[in-house]
Amino acid sequence: MKLSVLRMLTSLALLGVGFPSAVCNAYALDTQLDCQSSPHDFIAALLNEQSIDPKPMRIEANSVNAFRPTRGSNLTAFGFHVYAVFGYEPDDPMFKQGSGQPVNPSRYGVVVTGSVESVEASVRRAGSTAVVHEVIPLLLTAVFCNGH
């Protein structure tokens, strides 16, 4: 019995040693979500850094393109794990056209794992004017900017 407890504690300690390095290697998107950029610039930088998959995982009817973070990119926004990155800018070949009326104005942002209340508090503490919108209660929240 004591041996299994020791093994469990050792495993937890080893996990704890690896966790800070993963957090240190996280790529924070906070400054890019200050709403002073364009969707093109926001997405292009992430594509150039190979932080997101170049092929959208989803294209909404309103032409918003959603991109999956690449394995190991460890994207964060305001302290939350980034689940997806999205954007659309009219007449920009980087973005694929959806089947409906394109969103107006253009926009860009992220979907993070966290409740809308906690994400909103972090976004405001950082001084961002980004819009915070609940996607799935207590689980996924969108943080986005209208493009310039």
Image (tube, helix red, strand yellow):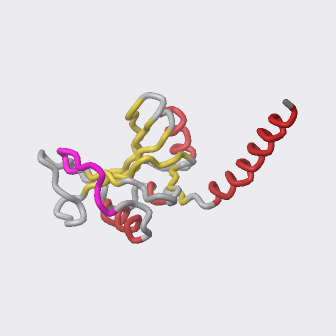
Q: Position of residue 122 (x, y in %)?
A: 55, 43
The N terminus lies in which quarter of the figure? top right
Could you say where residue 140 lies in the image, as x and y percent from the top left? Answer: 44, 37
Vertical comparison of 32 with 122: above or below:
below
Left or right placement of residue 66 versus residue 111 in this view: left
Count the numbered circles shown.
0
Percent across and percent down for residue 49 are 44, 69
Residue visible at 79% across and 41% down? 7
Q: Is residue 41 left or right of residue 123?
A: left
Magenta-drawn stretch contains 4: no
Query: Which residues are the magenta region?
Result: 54-63
Measuring 40% from the left and 31% from the top, which residue is drawn there? 136
Name the residue at the bottom extreme. 48
> In the rendered image, which quarter contains the C terminus?
bottom left
Image-based side of 2 in relation to 85, left or right: right
Q: Is residue 25 visible?
A: yes
Image vertical order of residue 69 relative to residue 123, above or below: below
Left or right of residue 92: residue 23: right
Q: Position of residue 87 (x, y in %)?
A: 30, 54
Q: Is residue 30 visible?
A: no
Q: Confirm whether the magenta stretch covers residue 60.
A: yes
Foreground residue among 148 and 30: 30
Secondary structure that dominates the magenta span? loop
Residue located 36% across and 60% down the image: 53
Residue placed farthest to the right in the image? 2
What residue lies at 77% left-to-right and 38% top-to-bottom? 8
